[in-house]
């Protein structure tokens, strides 16, 4: 608790705690003290998460560029565009959730 100011000021803060259920400091992650050996896997998973987010943005931008191309040409009706936009959002959510789940399994991050 005495490090809460430093954790809040830092770019990324990881707190170690013996009782993670009753501990909520101003940090980005709470890691159980008995799982400190999982820190390298956690950091690798965080880097993979960042790649997943960037990939999601790229897929979304590509989707919108293609849709904009059809819309500018006048070959995309407003009804079809209204149907495709929610489908685009749902597909990005499914991609992100699926890729995160696969990354977590690959990293071996499971509750003990």
Image (cartoon, helix red, strand yellow):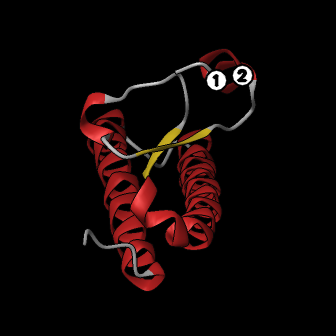
Q: Residue at x 62, y 71 (%)?
A: 40
Q: Residue at x 40, y 55 (%)?
A: 92
Q: Residue at x 47, y 79 (%)?
A: 107
Give left or right: position of 32 versus 53: left
Residue wearing tag 2: 6
Query: Residue 51: x percent and y percent?
Result: 64, 63
Res 80 quadrant in image: top left
Quote the CA–CA distance across marks 1 and 2. 5 Å
Q: As rendered, which of 15 and 27 lies closer to the eye?
A: 15
Looking at the rendered image, the disc whose residue lies closer to the viewer, 1 or 2, is 1
Q: Secondary structure at mark 1?
A: loop
Please say if 65 is above or below 12. below
- Which label belongs to residue 20? none
Query: Residue 82: x percent and y percent?
Result: 30, 35
Residue wearing tag 1: 3
Please say if 75 is above or below 78. below
Q: For the residues labelled 1 and 2, say whether their Cβ atoms are less than 8 Å apart.
A: yes
Q: Residue at x 56, y 47 (%)?
A: 64
């Amino acid at each position: 608790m005495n490090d809460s100011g430093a954790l809040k000021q830092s770019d990324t803060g990881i707190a170690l705690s013996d009782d993670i259920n009753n501990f909520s400091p101003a940090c980005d992650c709470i890691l159980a003290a008995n799982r400190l050996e999982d820190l390298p896997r956690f950091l690798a998973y965080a880097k993979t998460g960042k790649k997943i987010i960037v990939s999601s943005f790229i897929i979304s931008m590509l989707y919108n560029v293609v849709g904009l191309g059809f819309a500018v040409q006048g070959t995309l009706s407003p009804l079809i565009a209204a149907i495709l936009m929610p489908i685009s959002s749902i597909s990005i959510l499914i991609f992100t959730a699926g890729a995160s789940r696969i990354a977590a399994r690959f990293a071996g991050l499971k509750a003990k």
